[in-house]
Amino acid sequence: MARPTTAEKPKAKEPGRLRQIWDVLKMTRRLDPPSTWWLLGSLLLPIIAGLIIGLTTNQGNGFVLALWIVVGVLLGVLLGLVVLGRRAEKAAYSQIAGQPGAVGAVLRSSLRRGWRGSEMPVAVNPKTQDAIYRAVGRPGVVLIAEGPKTRTARMLDKERSTIGRILPNVPVSTLQVGPDAESVQLHQINRRLGKFKPKLTRAEVVAVSNRLSSLTSSQLPIPKGIDPLKVRSQRMR
């Protein structure tokens, strides 16, 4: 009997959901030890609350008590998964913080729906690797500087002036990601983008993004962004 060719060999099965969660949990605990207590608290508090409510309101009805316990368990699991996801993301991004291309990795892998961004910066200093990234959403254009404020201020002002000439009616905001005390951390980028007030329609977002993309030079010596998923054991799907 002929052996099956490479194309005929069965593909390796992807790990199941529970295995993915377990791998993410191990990675998070290794990189962020305090996350263990956050996860335990988020899991146990709803269960304890459900048990207390069930004991005080069941009036001798065992079904009511059991129902509140089940509700507490389900809420605890849900809250635990939410906390795990956030702590895992924070732990993963902490591994690439300060490296060139870290902001690009965030824009490529976890940018919120309704925003358009690219892992490639729109301006870069070849000597220091400081860079300016751009995200476009309903609040307008947000320029994200990667590097110390003293070194990126001029690049940021230049890019803001360029956008102002091309699209004078589009709001331009800025964020600073770097070693400065007031800078935004990588895991906070999406949260800070969500705080800007909407000013454009969805159609205008597409038009602005396409207009700016067509003007971005593809000849700049720009380093490619780092993939934060490579520092994770597995990513939950």
Image (cartoon, rainbow, N blue to C red):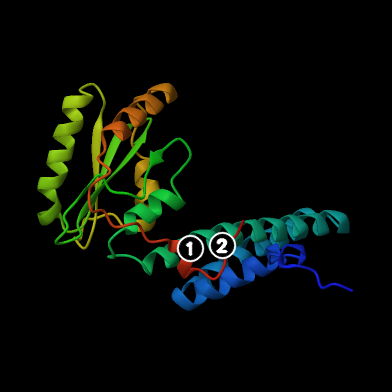
Q: Which residue is mark 2?
A: 235
Across and down, in percent, residue 154 comes to 10, 46
Residue 66 position (above or below residue 119): below
Q: Amino acid at mark 1?
A: Leu
Instruction: Give the residue at the far right of this rendering.
Output: 1
Tell me, yes or no, if residue 142 can be seen here.
yes
Instruction: Give the residue at the far front of this rendering.
Output: 2
Residue 123 left/right relative to 105: left
The N terminus appears in which quarter of the rendering? Answer: bottom right
At 71% from the left and 65% from the top, the residue drawn is: 16
Q: Amino acid at mark 2?
A: Arg
Front residue of 40 and 139:
139
Total tally of numbered discs in the picture = 2
Residue 28 position (above or below residue 182): below
Q: Which residue is mark 1?
A: 229
Residue 180 position (above or below residue 196): below
Across and down, in percent, residue 144 comes to 26, 47
